[in-house]
Image (cartoon, helix red, strand yellow):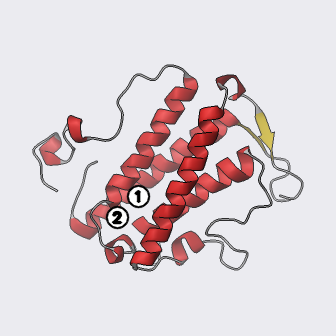
Amino acid sequence: MTNSTGYDGMWLPTAEDPRTQGNPQGELATYKEYLSNYRTTLRLKCEGLTPEQLATQSVPPSNLSLLGLIRHMARVENSWFMWFLQGKWDEPRLYKTPEEPDLDFTGVVGTQDCVDDAFASWEREIAAADKWLDALDEERLGEEIGFPEEAADYEDERASIRDVLVHLIEEYARHAGHADLLRETIDGRTGQ
């Protein structure tokens, strides 16, 4: 994609950038805007690529790919919003099995079916997370939640809703950096 906006064409013109640059009022609104913008950034990094390009792995032995990142973030959204924050521990894990804990990355294939499944899962998890966030009272941000007894590896761990939201923003930010490098190795595109 070529344009003449910002830093030698690396950025979309402001009027075409789908991310918001608002002045959110309140802590929760700020978290929601950052989360939304990082989700959009990851989506932009995948835009215009073929299934094969989306499944292109970085450098051996890593199995990191843009499509894997989409699947991984669907899994992350599901884990934190459904499992942890809403306590739906009886639901199956997304892109993870006891035999294959990294299925989000190892299960990637360069087919349209795999792409469609990954993006549909990610969009579904985002919609469910946003629905929960929209109903959240800002005064609950400091509320601590713990893992249930069934999660033996984590049973003593606790986190506030605030901590989880900041962690999700950090997770997206880290993976947006990975996506920058992956996209550049695929077609040279940088920025966004």
Q: Residue at x 56, y 69 (%)?
A: 104
The residue lying furthest to the left in this view is 4
**Amino acid tagged 2:** Leu
Q: Residue at x 23, y 41 (%)?
A: 16
- When asked about the image quadrant of residue 57, the answer is bottom left
Task: Report crowding for label 1: few under 14, some 14 to 19, many 20 or more residues within 10 A (C-alpha).
Answer: some
Q: Which mark is residue 143?
A: none
Question: Element type at marker 2?
Answer: helix
Question: Element type at marker 1?
Answer: helix
Q: Position of residue 122 (x, y in %)?
A: 51, 58
Please indicate whether residue 183 sits to the left or right of residue 65 in the image.
left
* Residue labelled with disc 2: 182
Q: Which mark is residue 178?
A: 1
Q: Residue at x 69, y 74 (%)?
A: 97
Looking at the image, do the residues carrying marks 2 and 1 touch, with CB atoms under 8 Å apart? yes
User: With respect to residue 179, does 147 lie above or below?
Assistant: above
**Amino acid tagged 1:** His
Q: How many marks?
A: 2
Please indicate whether residue 19 sits to the left or right of residue 104 in the image.
left
User: With respect to residue 153, does 133 lie above or below?
Assistant: above
| Mark 2–mark 1 distance (CA, rounded to whole Å) | 6 Å
Q: Residue at x 57, y 54 (%)?
A: 125
